[in-house]
Image: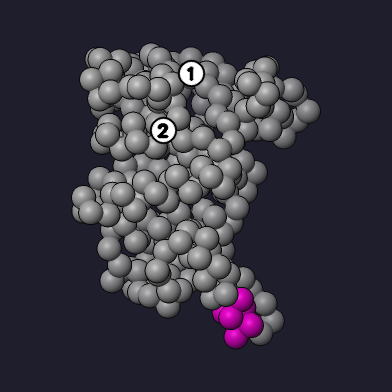
Amino acid sequence: MTGASDPAAAAGGRSPLLSVRDVVKTFGPVRAVDGVSLDFYPGEVVGIVGDNGAGKSTFLSLLTGFHHPDSGRFYYRGGEVHVRSPRMARTDLKIEMIYQRLELAPDLKVWENLFLGEELRWLWLWSARAAMRARAAEVLRQLNTKLSPEDIVGELSGGEQQAVAIGRAILFEREIIIMDEPTAAISVQKVGDVLSLIGRLRGAGKTVLLVSHRLEDLLQVSDRIVVFRQGKVRTVLENRGLSVGDLVHAMF
């Protein structure tokens, strides 16, 4: 991170948590991301929509360090950053990506999944395990779920597994949480639970980037909705009185 200042002025007394400026990513002759500039603020849910091939996934892969931009700049809390790897995105930018196919181990318990790959390693193994169980229980209480740290993840519903994935982001104090189609593979009855969790993340000051083809879900929880088309940001809509028809019109 350098001392470069963020070129984006604070909006409404707020400063962006993360800004991207003129970001470009090409694959051969295809400009998958073409000059995108966006600001993301603490405590907001930003919906991201666009037709297949619009550039959404590639843009998010740049934020999470899976791909590197050809040009453009990233600013985190006012300082320029260079995201070189997914680990750097997690540790330096506090970004957590929750994929549609949740990266969970179904045969392990909830607490084991929460700490998977980032386990506490103390001299006494039993002390580390007790600490991880206790911290897992606290995170589950914060999420207001009925889950137990001892539950086996593979026995949970789709919505409950989403809660585990979100819990991991909270446990490691991620500030930006990207969710890819979180309600696509769960029952209609559980959709409301996931949307409530997203609302609680916003209330806790987290920034949530929500990708979904379920436009009704976006309208229910988003503060703003970014519309991608052909690698560009076509428009950014404030979610005030928007309808599904408005979003469809903006996309096409």
Which image quadrant for residue 165? bottom left
Amino acid, disc 2: Ser
The secondary element bearing badge 2 is classed as loop
Q: Which residue is mark 1?
A: 36
Q: Label the magenta part by its dominant secondary structure.
A: helix
The stretch of residues the image draws in magenta is 126-131
Of pointers 2 and 1, the one earlier in the residue sequence: 1
Relative height, residue 238 to residue 62 (above, below): above
Whether residue 215 appears in this view of the structure is yes
Which sits in the foreground, 40 or 232?
A: 40
Residue 160, horizontal then vertical, whole percent: 34, 61
Residue 202 among magenta residues: no
| Mark 1 residue element | strand
Dot 2 corresponds to which residue?
A: 222
**Quadrant of the image containing the C terminus:** top left
The residue that appears at 63% across and 21% down in the rendered structure is 12
Which residue is pictured at 58% across the width and 56% down the height?
172
**Residue at the image position 39 percent from the left and 49 percent from the top:** 196
In the rendered image, the quadrant that contains the N terminus is top right
Q: Nearer the viewer, mark 2 or mark 1?
A: 2
Graded by Cα atoms within 10 Å as few (under 14), some (14 to 19) or many (20 or more), the crowding at tag 1 reads some
Question: Is residue 81 visible to us here?
Answer: no
- In this rendering, is residue 1 above or below 198? above
2 over 246 or under it: above or below: below
